[in-house]
Amino acid sequence: MAATTPVCEAFDGIAALAQAVRAREVSAVEVTRSCLERIAQLDDQLGCFLRVDEQGALRQAEAVDAKIREGADEELLLAGVPVGIKDMLCTKDLQTTAASKILAGFVPPYDATAVAKLRAAGAVVLGKLNMDEFAMGSSNENSALRPCKNPWDVTRVPGGSSGGSAAAVAASLCPLSLGTDTGGSIRQPAALCGVTGMKPTYGRVSRYGVIAFASSLDQVGPLGRSAVDLAQALQVIGGHDAHDATSLPLEQPDYLAACQTPIVDKNRRLRIGLPKEFFAQGLDPRIERCVRAAIASLQQEGAELVDVSLPLTKHSIAIYYLIATAEASSNLSRYDGVRYGLRVTPCDGEIGPGQSALVEMYKRTRAAGFGPEVQRRIMLGTYVLRSGYYDAYYRRASQVRTLVARDFAAAFTKCDVLMTPTSPVLPFRLGERLCDPLSMYLADIYTISCNLAGLPGLSMPCGLVTEAGSDRPLPVGVQVLGPPLHDAKVLQVAAAYQRITDWHKQRPQILTRPGAEAASP
Ligand code: GLN
């Protein structure tokens, strides 16, 4: 049985879809229904959504249609565009759990700013997307609620932590989603699922209402079909927010205009830097071939290639796992069974002499509520912040972090953007790396330093690789990194690449049942 092709697929991008909804060629309700139908047909198998809010989505769509009928639609840049939201962002009256048991039943009383801005622009929130618990992971396998599969091959991982956000777009369950990226969690799943995803400059998008993992690294960003779609989304969700002290008090550039700007004009050619440390040992040669071909196609358009070096890359994983775990252990201390979600209370007879019922409740709640990876990080982070260790670990890591940012600044004196692979490996099989957390950490080598330096970074599809003995092609992603605040430049380069190639238009053949005929697109 073939699955429904959602209405969105008939449009060339979300701006065209919104335009058609505003012109009343198609209603927001019809668009929303078709996505809900496809989710009902495919998501049992894929596991992209943790919660689908059918009633809420249809109500929002009806409200958008009503506004358009009344002629109050100038502000509705995303009229009727269905979106999925990573379960890390608070959604008013819609359960938000960060894919953790400890937040079971938590219903936020307000929307995260990014979500509120999407709704105000007419987007329709379909539901909450799967992820690694508290965004800790690179495969979505740490979700405490249900696994998520890669739509290109359901025996493989979609990447993480925003696995559901990437897989939902890849499977055409929604044309746009929000994710968060602390060390690669938007870009790596985008690469593994063959979609385009962007982590904006730190501070571009408000973190208000976003469940905190590592506050100095976390950033919200969009995942979608193309750089142009991301530009449209960023225009809506970005900008200063007084509720977030780290949000940048700056006007946003015109991201859409940047996407139309050629990379070469008569005065200046785009300079693309290739950091040699990103094309080193450990990189799958099939990925390297696709990434180099992508860079070569921009060279043919007139871009100039420059060799650069980022010598501190080798330290980035170590620094990240000191900073991220330290901040996580502090941020996650609020989940104590008192204020949110789960509470495991000991029975009367279980409290021994000298034991405190309150402390026992904390312990039991946290032991039952957090999964093994989250517990591992809390323990590491607590160790890192222990008195007497702070100088040796957190302070030291923060100092080296500054040097990493300087490494990038030096490279950007020679080039406008960097292009690199996003992930050194293809989507791996579910379960393959679970017993070896370190090998999972190492797979973030190309994405982590961007967060340490606060840069904008984007991943987009640049090829398909079919492994020996398989008939399922797997996507490869190329990463574009820019200097801080040069988000528009990153989008410009990605849009230029997507004008001359069509990797971003490839869709997986999804089997609705093993052995059943393929559902397209
Ligand atoms: N994979 C990295 C980690 O496990 C990054 C996660 C993220 O960006 N949220 O921490």
Image (cartoon, helix red, strand yellow):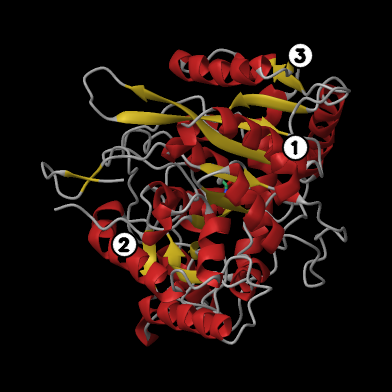
Q: Which residue is mark 3?
A: 306
Q: As rendered, which of 265 and 142 lies closer to the eye?
A: 265
The image quarter containing residue 322 is top right
Q: Amino acid at mark 1?
A: Thr
Vertical position of residue 208 compared to residue 230: above or below: below
The residue at 80%/36% (across/down) is 483
Q: Quarter containing ligand 1?
A: top right
Find out if the beta carbon at label 2 lies less than 8 Å from the nearest ligand 1 atom. no
Residue beneath the point at 36% across and 30% down: 474
C-alpha gap between disc 1 and disc 2: 36 Å
> Could you say which is closer to the camera, residue 262 or residue 32?
262
* Mark 1 vs mark 3, CA separation in Å: 21 Å
Lateral position of residue 40 relative to residue 63, left or right: left
User: Where 93 sits versus 398, above or below?
Assistant: below
Q: Earlier in the sequence, mark 1 or mark 2?
A: 2
Q: Say which of 478 and 105 sits in front.
A: 478
- Give the residue drawn at x 42%, y 58%: 8
Indicate left or right for 348 with 408 as reference.
Answer: left
**Percent position (x, y) of residue 88?**
54, 62
Q: Are marks 1 and 2 in contact (CB under 8 Å)?
A: no
In the rendered image, residue 517, in percent from the top left (x then y), is placed at 14, 43
Of labels 1 and 3, earlier in sequence is 1
Image quarter of the C terminus: top left
Which residue bears the numbered disc 2? 39
Query: Residue placed at 71% from the left, 58% from the top?
Result: 235
